[in-house]
Amino acid sequence: MDDSFELTASMMCADYGHLEQEVRNLEEGGIDSFHIDIMDGRYVPNFAMSLNDLRYIRSAAKKPLDVHLMVEHPSNTIELFINSLRPGDTIYIHPEAEYHPSTTLQKIINAGLIPGIAINPGTSVENVRMLLRIVKKVLVMSVNPGNAAQMFLPYVGEKYDQLLAMKDAMNFEIYWDGACGVDKIREFAPKGVKGFVLGTTLLFGKGRPYKETLEKIRAMEF
């Protein structure tokens, strides 16, 4: 099994009573990046992490942050997030949440950050085709956004196949978010999906060291 795929920790699932230790244990365990879910209670029916959570994890972590903005009109607040991050970090926006998503993406690019879009299960590849030419990462939601521990939506597999056929020509990478089990990594990493967001399905709340879990995932020893 090719172990070149990336693993990112969904920090909304972390233990907030020991957040600094969580960051340290994940980094020592071999995590590649930290996934930060920002929800405004409007674009999705939930509130998740705050700007202060992001800033704290950014100060504690050496590895990159991937910030997933599930908010209405991210252009209105994008500078707050840009100014809280470092070069090499990623910001994903949802195209449906913005009147002019390319303008917001350009602000991310101009700040030296990595531009990405997140695609909901109900959003077709055709609806975002033009944006694929300017982003570097595409986060494909295999569940509806807004909550952890949801069921995988099987029809999303076809969307991955469509994007995999386009990614080299358009120069972007594909990332999996939602209900990520070992079976999904085993199937889609060899096809070319670059990274996987790990939450309660595989990583958190398992009662064993993160290093052990991450090594098992990379070796597919499940």
Image: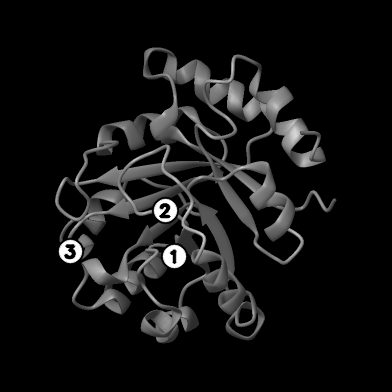
Any part of residue 82 in sight = no
- Which kind of residue does numbered mark 1 sit on? Gly
Q: In screen coordinates, is 22 left or right of 96?
A: right
Q: Residues within 10 Å of mark 2 (few under 14, many from 20)?
A: many
Q: Which residue shows up at 59% across the image and 33% down it?
A: 202
Relative to 13, residue 91 above or below: below
Q: Which residue shows up at 25% across the image and 36% down it?
A: 50
Q: Residue 73 carries which label?
A: 3
Relative to 173, residue 217 above or below: above
Residue 182 location, quadrant: top right
What residue does disc 1 label?
Answer: 116
Q: Please, what secondary structure does the residue beneath circle 1 have?
A: strand
Question: In this rendering, which labeled residue sits more in front, label 2 or label 1?
Answer: 2
Q: In screen coordinates, is 149 left or right of 187?
A: left
Mark positioned earlier in the residue sequence (2 or 1): 1
Residue 164 lies, in percent from the top left, at 63, 74
What residue does disc 2 label?
Answer: 143
Mark positioned earlier in the residue sequence (3 or 2): 3
Q: Residues within 10 Å of mark 3 (few under 14, many from 20)?
A: many
- Which kind of residue does numbered mark 2 sit on? Val
Image quarter hosting the C terminus: top right
Residue 31 location, quadrant: top right
- Which kind of residue does numbered mark 3 sit on? His
